[in-house]
Image (cartoon, grey):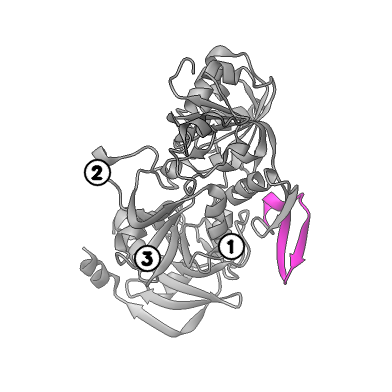
C-alpha cells in the first residue's frame, strides 16, 4: 500500500467509529476522516470558532475569514454557528464534544498520549491539543502503527512529553484497533494482512485480546472504499 | 428611535485615523493582538504602527505569529521582546530567534490562553483548568484535586493595549465580527486598558441589531476604519 492508501484506510476505519454527534478532527490523518463521515449525522467543530464545518470550497468561493484549525478554507452548513475562542474551548474542555480523532507521536497502554513535543527539541507549539484531549468525551487516536523510522508508537509508557494522562479510548492503525479500558490495552480488531507475530514485533505495549475480537480483510475493505 | 435622540448619544469611544490611534500605544507595551492563522489579524493597525511609530520592546499576547502577517513583520524588525501564545513552530524565523535568545516565549494551551483573556477582562485573576495537568506545561504551576481530578492553577491575562479586528462598529463603538475572524478578538477587547479596533465599516447607531452585538462599546476605546486617512 502507498502512504496515502495507508492513511486513507486509517481515516476510513476511524470514521466507522462515529455514528453521530459533534466531533473535532485533528491535523494530519484525522483531517481525512471528514471524507468518510455520514453526511448530516456528524457535525464538525473547529477550535477557531465554528460549529458545523462544511467541505472545502471551490477556489472562487474561498473566504479568508472562513478557515479551519489547519488554516485551510472551509464552508459552513445550514446549522453552523460562529463564536469566540473562549466559547469554542468551553465546548472542548467542558466535555461537550462527543469525540475527537487526533494523531499521536506515542500512545501508552494506560491511555496516556504524547502528541506535541519531542525531547531535546524546542517546545514552541501546543495549540489546542491538550484541551481537546482533556475534554472530549471520547478520544480516538488515528495513527500509523509505527514511526517513519519503523519505531513502535504504541508503548507500555510514553517516552515523549505527555499531552494528557489516561485519556485515550481507542487507537486505530493500518493493522489494528485497540481499546483502552481501566488502563489496560485490548486488541479488538486485526487485519488479516498481518500475523500476530509481526503485530507483536511492532507493538511495544503488552495487550490482551478483547472479548469481541475480530479479524478483517483490509484489501476487501479498501476495495469497497475506492 | 428618532434622529435627534441618536445624535445626542455620546459614548467614551473615540473614532480616529490609524496613525492617531497607534500613537497612543506606549513603548515597550504589553499588547494583545487578535487573530488565528491569517484570519482576524488587525493588519491595518499593525502596518500603521510599523510605518509611523518607533515602538519596540513589545510583549505580544497572541495565538501565534503567522508568517506573512504584519505581526510577523513587526517581529522580523526585532520589535517584539517576548511572546505569550500557543503555537510558534509554523514560523522558522521565530524558532530561530528563540534559539538565539532574541525572543522570549511563554507557551500556553490554547484553551488556557482564551480563558485567561476572558477572565482577565472579567475581574478574575486566576482559575483552575484540567488542561495540561500532569504535563511539562504544568511543571512549575500549582495544582489541586477537585472531585478526584487534577486541575492546574493558571493566571488570567490583562494588558496595556489590545489591537482588535472586527467587521463593523456603530457610532457608539459596539462591534460585530465576521465568521472565523472573530477568534480571540472579543476576549482581548475585554482584557486591555486601551482597546483599539480596526473595522471594515463604521455604521450609524441603530444599524446593528442589539441582539447581534458581540462586543458592547464599554470594552472599546478607539475605532479605526480600515483604509481611512481620517475620520
B228 versus B86 height, above or below = above
Residue A177 belongs to the span the image colors magenta: no
- Which comes before the other along the chain, label 2 or label 3? 3
Discs 2 and 1 share one subunit: yes
Q: Which residue is mark 3?
A: A42
The answer for how far apart the CA atoms under marks 2 and 3 are is 22 Å
Q: Which residue is mark 2?
A: A58
Q: Secondary structure at mark 1?
A: loop
Q: Residue at x 55, y 53 (%)?
A: A87
Q: Secondary structure at mark 3?
A: strand
Q: Given the image, what chain letter belongs to the residue carrying mark 1?
A: A
Q: Residues within 10 Å of mark 1 (few under 14, many from 20)?
A: some
A151 versus B72 height, above or below = below
Q: Secondary structure at mark 2?
A: loop
Q: Residues within 10 Å of mark 3 (few under 14, many from 20)?
A: some
Q: Nearer the viewer, residue A155 or A134?
A: A134
Q: Nearer the viewer, residue A4 or A164?
A: A164
Q: Residue at x 71, y 52 (%)?
A: B138
For residue A94, which numbered disc appears in the image? 1
Q: Given the image, what chain letter belongs to the residue carrying mark 2?
A: A
Residue occupying the far bottom of the picture: A211
The x and y percentages for residue B121 are 67, 43
Q: Quadrant of residue B203?
A: top left
The x and y percentages for residue B106 are 67, 39
Left/right placement of residue B136 relative to residue B5 reads right
Please provide the residue range marked out in magenta: B135-153
The answer for how far apart the CA atoms under marks 1 and 3 are is 19 Å
Q: Given the image, what chain letter belongs to the residue carrying mark 3?
A: A
Amino acid at each position: 500500500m502507498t502512504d496515502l492508501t495507508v492513511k486513507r484506510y486509517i481515516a476510513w476505519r476511524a470514521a466507522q467509529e462515529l455514528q453521530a454527534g459533534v466531533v473535532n478532527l485533528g491535523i494530519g490523518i484525522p483531517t481525512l476522516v471528514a471524507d468518510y463521515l455520514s453526511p448530516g449525522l456528524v457535525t464538525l467543530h473547529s477550535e477557531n470558532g465554528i460549529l458545523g464545518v462544511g467541505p472545502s470550497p471551490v477556489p472562487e468561493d474561498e473566504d479568508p475569514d472562513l478557515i479551519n484549525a489547519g488554516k485551510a478554507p472551509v464552508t459552513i452548513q445550514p446549522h453552523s454557528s460562529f463564536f469566540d475562542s473562549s466559547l469554542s474551548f468551553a465546548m472542548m474542555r467542558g466535555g461537550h464534544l462527543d469525540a475527537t480523532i487526533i494523531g499521536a507521536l506515542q500512545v501508552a497502554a494506560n491511555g496516556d498520549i504524547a502528541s506535541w513535543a519531542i525531547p531535546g527539541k524546542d517546545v514552541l507549539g501546543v495549540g489546542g491539543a491538550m484541551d481537546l484531549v482533556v475534554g472530549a468525551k471520547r478520544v480516538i487516536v488515528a495513527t500509523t502503527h509505527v514511526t517513519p523510522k519503523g519505531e513502535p508508537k504504541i508503548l507500555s509508557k510514553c517516552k515523549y512529553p505527555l499531552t494528557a494522562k489516561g485519556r485515550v479510548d481507542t487507537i486505530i492503525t493500518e493493522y489494528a484497533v485497540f481499546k483502552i479500558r481501566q488502563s489496560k490495552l485490548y486488541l479488538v480488531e486485526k487485519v488479516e494482512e498481518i500475523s500476530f507475530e509481526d503485530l507483536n514485533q511492532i507493538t511495544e505495549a503488552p495487550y490482551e485480546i478483547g472479548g469481541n475480537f475480530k479479524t478483517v480483510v483490509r484489501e476487501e475493505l479498501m476495495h469497497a472504499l475506492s | 428611535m428618532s434622529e435627534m435622540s441618536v445624535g445626542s448619544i455620546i459614548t467614551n469611544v473615540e473614532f480616529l485615523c490609524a496613525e492617531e490611534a497607534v500613537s497612543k500605544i506606549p513603548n515597550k507595551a504589553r499588547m494583545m493582538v487578535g487573530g488565528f492563522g491569517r484570519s482576524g489579524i488587525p493588519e491595518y493597525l499593525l502596518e500603521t504602527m510599523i510605518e509611523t511609530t518607533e515602538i519596540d520592546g513589545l510583549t505580544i499576547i497572541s495565538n501565534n505569529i503567522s508568517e506573512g502577517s504584519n505581526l510577523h513583520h513587526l517581529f522580523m524588525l526585532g520589535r517584539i521582546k517576548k511572546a505569550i501564545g500557543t503555537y510558534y513552530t509554523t514560523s522558522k524565523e521565530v524558532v530561530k530567534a528563540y534559539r538565539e535568545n532574541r525572543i522570549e516565549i511563554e507557551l500556553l494551551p490554547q484553551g488556557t490562553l482564551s480563558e485567561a483573556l476572558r477572565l482577565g477582562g472579567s475581574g478574575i485573576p486566576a482559575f483552575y483548568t484540567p488542561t495540561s495537568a500532569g504535563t511539562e506545561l504544568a511543571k512549575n504551576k500549582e495544582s489541586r484535586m477537585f472531585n478526584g481530578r487534577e486541575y492546574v492553577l493558571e493566571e488570567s491575562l490583562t494588558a496595556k493595549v489590545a489591537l482588535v479586528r472586527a467587521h463593523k462598529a456603530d457610532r457608539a463603538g459596539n462591534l460585530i465580527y465576521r465568521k472565523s475572524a472573530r477568534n480571540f478578538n472579543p476576549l482581548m477587547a475585554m482584557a486591555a486598558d486601551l482597546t483599539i479596533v480596526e473595522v471594515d465599516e463604521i455604521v450609524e447607531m441603530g444599524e446593528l441589531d442589539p441582539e447581534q452585538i458581540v462586543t458592547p462599546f464599554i470594552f472599546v476605546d478607539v475605532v479605526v476604519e480600515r483604509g481611512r486617512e481620517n475620520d
